[in-house]
Amino acid sequence: MKLTRRAFLGAAGAMTTLTLWPSLGLAAQNANDTRLLVVLLRGGLDGLHTLIPTDDPNYRSLRGDLAPGDPLKLDTNFGLHPSLAFAHELYGKQQLLPVVAIAPPYQQRSHFEAQDCLENGSARPSGANTGWLNRCAGAMAGTEALSITTVMPLIMRGPGDASTWSPPLPEEVNPILLQRLQDLYAQDTALAANFQRAMATQGVAGMGGGGGKGRMAAATASAAKFMSQANGPRIAFVEDSGWDTHAGEAAILKNKLSELDDGLRAFHDGAATIWDKTVVVVVTEFGRTAKVNGTGGTDHGTGGLALLAGGAVRGGRIAGNWPGLSQTALNEGRDLRVTTDMRALFKAVLAGHLRVDEGKLDTAVFPDSDKVRAMEGLLA
């Protein structure tokens, strides 16, 4: 898709469903044995803090001090947050593709309803009680799917062949809770220094620590290990929480985006043998308000950001249709307007990369979605 100035995701653990994926032995020898990893960032990633519209004259006035300094330049219009150094490397190799102004069909501001809509693959939060990734596996003969989670998420539920695996992930404290505690402890001169030292041992960026690799990298490394096996799953899912940044967003996202970057690197390094035939799709349930609120954060919005990565991606550019941030362009005067239905991205990847029948995509995988056409030009 051409961009114009106006137009633009250890052997230890618990296998909850025991399987060695025996049905995939022959598929692994097939030239079309492609892989898909879906990463869901729960809480609503602030896409405007992740992919900075450096050429939009309204951005600085809306964001003020929240605007990240020294973004990593992508083109004349956009830059990446400084914490996404590895993602920036992938962009330079044409293996990262940001997609702007994208969201599920549900465009209200409830986390739970938006996530349900994204995961069930319909046009409504209550539109299906099974997940589109499970139905995708069911539409592909002999294909199994793996969820790197402690419980089966909605996106993977259904009659299709899907398993969960829970790795021994490192313990972490919610970064939003830490940010709020920091403000509290800062008011006590006797305790403030001790709190900062505790944050340093946790590796919390922006609070005296350098940031650790954390749960995201552990989960994506596990996904890479399984998917790289000759009889491994072709479809996998990873999730991460802590992206609901109503206050103190700059410090929280400095750390969280670093964790996302570590997660991409861990998967890339662990999936070296299959990287060229892999697509990683990073999505979130909605975007956030264009203007910073009174507590240094942003509130629930609509238009968001997706990231595609992998050797099978036609990256090194920006995809989607950029509506701009002028007051008249914003949705309800507050949010980035949605210009792409997220199902259009999913359809493009499933049809072009996994070779899922387009008729099944319109009816079984994404019910009653024949009017949603797949995006073009996303794949190498």
Image (cartoon, helix red, strand yellow):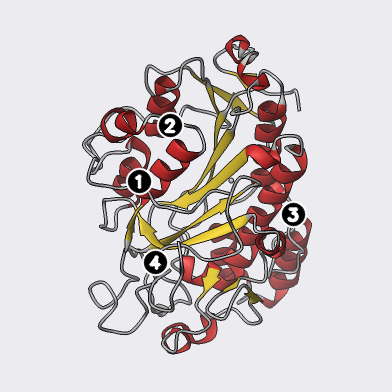
Tell me the quarter of the picture where residue 18 sits.
top right
* Badge 2 vs badge 4, beta-carbon distance below 8 Å: no
x and y percentages locating residue 25 in the rendered image: 65, 13
Cα distance in 3D space between marks 3 and 2: 30 Å
**Residue at 43% from the left image edge and 37% from the top image edge:** 351
What residue is rendered at 66% in x and 46% in y?
A: 311
Looking at the rendered structure, the secondary structure element under dot 2 is helix
CA gap, disc 1 to disc 4? 20 Å
Question: Going 67% across and 71% down the picture, which residue do you hit?
Answer: 82
Do callouts 3 and 2 mark residues in contact (Cβ within 8 Å)?
A: no
First of labels 1, 4 by sequence position: 4
Q: Which residue is mark 4?
A: 288
Pointer 2 residue: 133
Image coordinates of residue 201 in percent, x first then y, are: 78, 57
Estimate the spatial distance between the alpha carbons at disc 1 and disc 2, rounded to whole Å: 12 Å
Q: Quadrant of the N terminus?
A: bottom left
User: Can residue 170 be seen from the camera position used here?
Assistant: no
Report the residue marked by disc 1: 343
